[in-house]
């Protein structure tokens, strides 16, 4: 999820740069569309609407070749939902991030009886890094591009990042670059080339930390509810609502305390403290 969130952030912040790279056109009027598609909800990685040309650029980023359901079926599903909702031309691109020889990264279409659907596939490790070095929003992907000297390429990206004048932009691009570079480079080398202060001060890093904390809180909440149900039986909706408002630290405390609970009154007393 960290890589997904990083790339979604980059595309949403710099959509015109991804359009120039992938569509070879000059964007003039674009709009970021919601990525949760209708019917049974599924969420795409990035959906950008080019209003002037009435076209959608849909991107999916993959760190692993394996996918459930299989990626070709997912791409067909995304296309049908997008076309039903917006009724316009849709350019779909799957970008594989981590080098692999899996046959799955060479599949570019879904095929079944009476149905065939094609999309573009980019294996980023085969791409010339030069176009990616041209724009700040593409610099993180440049670390994964084709090269005979990976360390030299990473150093070149680090120099490009350090030359970004606007502080907040430099911090965010630095964080995204470090996170994506971690797919193929040793962390010690990354630390040598990039300022750690950028990581700590970056808005996107704080967002990732917050999302991680929220995911941890939700996991702890599910665990506590299962334990309470096993310990006390059914928990009333009113008590469930109170428990759902607890912080991660409070949920952890409740997880320890409930081992001594014997009745619902024990839970009520703990919540009222």
Image (spheres, helix red, strand yellow):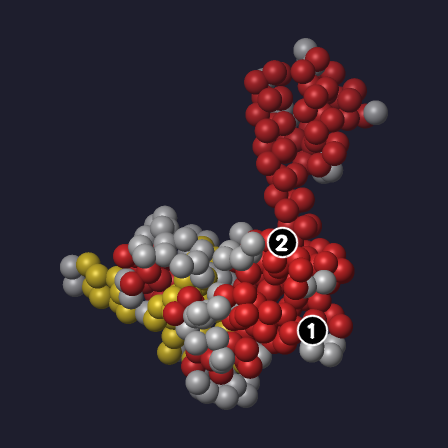
Q: Which residue lies furthest to the top in this view?
A: 262
How many residues crowd mark 2 within 10 Å: few (<14), some (14–19), many (20+)? few
Residue placed most toward the observer, 204 or 266: 204
Residue 264's place in the image compared with 218, above or below, is above
Q: Where is residue 240 in the image (x, y as percent from the top left)?
A: 66, 31
Q: Which residue position holds label 1?
A: 162
- Helix, strand or loop at disc 1? helix
> Which mark, by number, is residue 237?
none
Which image quarter is the C terminus in? top right
Judging by the rendered image, the residue that carries numbered circle 2 is 188
Q: Is residue 253 visible?
A: yes
Instruction: Looking at the image, tell me whether mark 2 or mark 1 is earlier in sequence order.
Output: 1
In this view, the mark in front (2 or 1): 2
Horizontal side, residue 203 vs residue 13: left or right? right
Query: Is residue 66 or residue 210 the one in the foreground?
Result: 66
Of all residues, the one furthest to the left in this rendering is: 113
Which residue does the image show at 43% across and 58% down from the upper left? 98
Q: Position of residue 210 (x, y in %)?
A: 69, 50
How far is disc 2 from disc 1 in space, using C-alphas? 18 Å
Residue at screen point 57% across, 18% down: 230
Q: Which residue is drawn at 63% across and 76% down?
A: 160
Taking the spot 35% from the left edge, 62% from the top edge, the residue there is 75
Secondary structure at badge 2 equals helix
Residue 101 placement, left or right of 230? left
In the image, farthest residue toward the right: 273
- Expressed as whole percent of the image width and height from the top left, the position of residue 145 reads 46, 69
């Amino acid at each position: 999820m960290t890589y997904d969130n990083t790339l979604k952030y980059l595309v949403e912040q710099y959509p015109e740069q991804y359009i120039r790279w992938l569509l070879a056109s000059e964007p003039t009027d674009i709009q970021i569309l919601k990525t949760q598609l209708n019917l049974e909800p599924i969420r795409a990685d990035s959906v950008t609407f080019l209003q002037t040309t009435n076209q959608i650029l849909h991107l999916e980023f993959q760190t692993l070749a394996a996918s459930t359901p299989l990626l070709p079926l997912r791409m067909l599903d995304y296309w049908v939902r997008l076309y039903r909702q917006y009724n316009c031309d849709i350019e779909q691109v799957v970008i594989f991030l981590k080098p692999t020889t899996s046959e799955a990264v060479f599949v570019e279409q879904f095929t079944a009886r009476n149905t065939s659907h094609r999309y573009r596939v980019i294996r980023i490790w085969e791409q010339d890094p030069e176009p990616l070095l041209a724009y700040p929003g593409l610099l993180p992907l440049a670390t994964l591009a084709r090269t005979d000297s990976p360390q030299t390429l990473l150093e070149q990206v680090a120099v490009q990042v350090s030359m970004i004048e606007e502080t907040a932009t430099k911090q965010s691009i630095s964080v995204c670059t470090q996170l994506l570079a971690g797919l193929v480079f040793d962390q010690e080398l990354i630390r040598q080339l990039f300022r750690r202060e950028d990581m700590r001060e970056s808005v996107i890093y704080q967002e990732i930390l917050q999302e991680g904390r929220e995911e941890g809180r939700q996991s702890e909440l599910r665990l506590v509810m299962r334990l309470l149900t096993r310990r006390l039986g059914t928990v009333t909706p009113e008590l469930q609502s109170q428990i759902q408002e607890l912080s991660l630290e409070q949920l952890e405390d409740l997880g320890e305390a409930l081992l001594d609970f014997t009745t619902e009154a024990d839970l009520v007393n703990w919540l009222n403290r």
